[in-house]
Amino acid sequence: MKEPESILKPESQHFIEQAIEKDLSEGKNGGRVHTRFPPEPNGYLHIGHAKAICLDFGMAEQYGGKCNLRFDDTNPTKEDVEYVDSIKEDIRWLGFTWEDREFYASDYFGKLWDFAVSLIKRGLAYVDDQSAEAISGQKGTVTRPGEESRFRNQDVRSIEENLDLFYRMNEGEFEEGSRVLRAKIDMASPNMHMRDPIIYRILKTPHHRTGSKWKVYPMYDFAHGQCDYFEGITHSLCTLEFEVHRPLYDWFIDQLKTDDYRPRQIEFNRLNLTYTVMSKRKLLELVKDKVVRGWDDPRMPTLCGLRRRGYTPESVRRFVDLIGYTKVEAINDVSLLEYAIREDLNKRAPRVFGVLKPLKVIIINYSGNITEEMDIENNPGDESHGRRLVPFSRELFIEQDDFMENPPHKFFRLAPGQEVRLKGAYIIKCTGVVKNDAGEVTEVHCSYDPETRSGGPQAGRKVKGTLHWVSALHALDAEVRLYDRLFSDEDPSGHRDVDPREFLNPDSLTILSGCKVEPSLAEAKPLDKFQFQRVGYFCVDYDSRPGRLVFNRTVGLKDTWARMNR
RNA sequence: UGCUCCGUGGUGUAAUUGGCAACACGCCUGACUCUGGAUCAGGAAAGUCUAGGUUCGAGCCCUAGCGGAGCAACCA
């Protein structure tokens, strides 16, 4: 065992912890740490969000502060309560709580409106009648400054007219797209976001919370920073791409603030995982086009997908902990995620016998009239998991891969003349095979040595291999779904002008039916997790029913034999 | 081409803030094992993008270059 972490060299701090501690030591915000997790309810959460959630809630927890849940619901055309509910479920599943601090950007529509009105009154915002095309045409490029809209000029449009138009925009008098409200900042700014950004647009789609009260909605950039400000957020943690938005947020807060309090935005690297895509837009496409079975398809990097796949919240949090927070754009190896779930399930998943591709074994010197109950530990590494009884009889199933008629060197499994131990039962020796017309082995005949029963007089005899097995008479039928990476390319969205779907892995799902599992699994319920010994970790799918068991393979075991054969 | 950010083993992160480049995953070897799992012991693998500079001493500071990413939605 390793030493407890506390007496090891203290874990080094990442740059955000350092920043927070510096603020704390300087007495900023009266020693408060208050963060927020601000999802848009327009899709399901994925593991990239888990990274943000762990940071937002984690920093608050670590420094004795609070973390708000705030839905960024400023665009009714894309958002829905379905997503609100799933997001809350996923955050709870991860193990975090926002107590009574469930907020919505839409809670602040009134304040935001008032702020916009105040900007107009101060000559810092104006209504622009131009089309979207015209406005973007005047925006300039990254190397060339933009041109000012003629409506920017107060001689053309007075403050009074701006106010009148803004009110009428919200009364529904004008069509969507016919007018917008813009902040008057700097059309020549090297930062594109400062070139008179649009802050309000007309949208007549009813909002999932405010109904049709509003006809104008604030843009994200006009809402986000101010909401943080309204909530007294001290540290606004977000991903790298918002770095260039920060000056704009600061500009708005400058117009709003009454003292020197200001949320501090710190940007960190987003999570990218190999062999998958992580943008909500791309994930939504996979769902809509039925490439996968839904948001919770076990191949999806969504939290609901990982949950259905058999991942535990602890393993997800452990993974997030392992990858850290930096400012380097990185792509994390999915095998580290797999390590995290193996590590967790190795401790908690009971061991059972499950045979994916059954091959019949007949013990020729074992009576056909008896059944023995073999007493087998549920987790060899941890006695507290207890033991169970597994029935053994003359006819068994073993894994097809565990038998070879003409084995290569170092094949420690069953082969003619070769001995193996049946885990928890007897040592058997292969005495012959039965083949069908096609020459395939359909039955393996073995003899057993009664002295070698586990716990018996000859139990200590060494044989090279140990196999898992199920009694043919007692085994339960099951369907097993094997998952592989969704994409065959390490970085499917990392190719310019190539649709990631060019790289879809056609073998990402394999459904096996007629699998045989031990009878103790009869009552297994969805999301129950097991290790099918020597095969991998599996969890019961939502589709599973008593008498029609369905398992998902979460992840395989490390397989030295398979690796040797690569 | 403008602005912003970033370059440390294969991957992801560290380096007590200027002092022997460390950790995890992966890989290799051995031990142990009634899971070819787990566990344990050991090993290979970067000299920190490049070139200068400051310094007794630079991954860290300075200068220049090179390379990568982000930003021009009435999306968030």
Image (spheres, coloured by chain):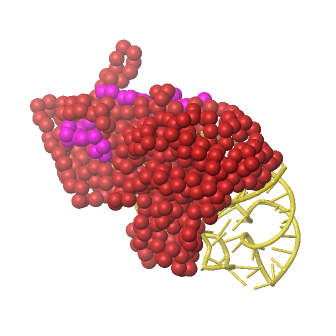
Does A207 sit above or below residue A384? above
Q: Which residues are magenta?
A: A502-529
Q: Is residue A332 above or below residue B64?
A: above
Above/below status of A434 relative to A130: above
Q: Position of residue A467 (x, y in %)?
A: 32, 41
Residue A115 occupies which quadrant of the picture? bottom right
At 11% across and 35% down in the image, what residue appears?
A: A370
**Residue A507 shows in this picture:** no
Q: Nearer the viewer, residue A393 or A178?
A: A178
Residue shown at 58% from the left, 57% from the top: A118
Shown in yellow, the chain is B
Residue at image point 40% right, 44% down: A209
Residue A154 placement, left or right of A485: right
Residue B27 at x, y percent in the picture: 56, 51
Tell which residue pokes out farthest to the left in this image.
Answer: A369
Would you say residue A42 sits in the magenta stretch? no
Identity of the residue drawn at 42% across and 66% down: A66
Colour chosen for chain A: red
- What is the x, y in percent for residue A200? 58, 45
